[in-house]
Amino acid sequence: MKSTVLRSVGYAQDEAVLEVEFTNREVYRYFVVPRRVYVALLASSNPGRCFNQTVRDRYPVRQVR
């Protein structure tokens, strides 16, 4: 993933959980995220901006590390 903010993203479809690793190595899990949001992140030319517009402050979240 080419981003100055996001290092990697993953998605567990069965649980609708989006896992995001930031460039500072912090990892967060976002819950009840539609698959289309994950697909949009992968397809985005600016994943950091896409994340801020479609994920941040919109879904329940828990820090993993």
Image (tube, helix red, strand yellow):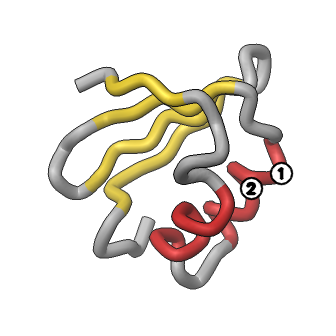
Amino acid beneath label 2: Val
Number of labels in the image equals 2
Going 80% across and 42% down the picture, which residue do you hit?
Answer: 35
Numbered tag placed on residue 44 in the rendering: none
Residue 25: image quadrant is: top left
Amino acid beneath label 1: Arg
The one nearer the camera, 2 or 31, is 31
Q: Quadrant of the N terminus?
A: bottom left
Q: Position of residue 4 (x, y in %)?
A: 29, 74
| Left-right relation of 52 to 42 | left
Q: Position of residue 24 (x, y in %)?
A: 16, 52
* Extreme residue toward the bottom, this view: 45
Q: Position of residue 29 (x, y in %)?
A: 48, 29
Going 75% across and 52% down the picture, which residue do you hit?
Answer: 37
Q: Which residue is mark 2?
A: 39
Q: Is residue 8 above or below residue 61?
A: below
Going 64% across and 37% down the picture, which residue do you hit?
Answer: 59
Marks 2/1: CA distance?
Answer: 5 Å
- Classed neighbour count for the residue bearing mark 2: other residues with Cα under 10 Å, few (<14), some (14–19), many (≥20): few
Residue 33: image quadrant is: top right
* Marks 2,1: beta carbons within 8 A: yes
Secondary structure category for the residue under label 2: helix
Q: Position of residue 58 (x, y in %)?
A: 65, 46
Going 69% across and 50% down the picture, which residue do you hit?
Answer: 38
Q: Is residue 14 above or below residue 18?
A: above
Numbered tag placed on residue 36 in the rendering: 1
Q: Quadrant of the C terminus?
A: top left
Secondary structure category for the residue under label 1: helix
* Extreme residue toward the front, this view: 57
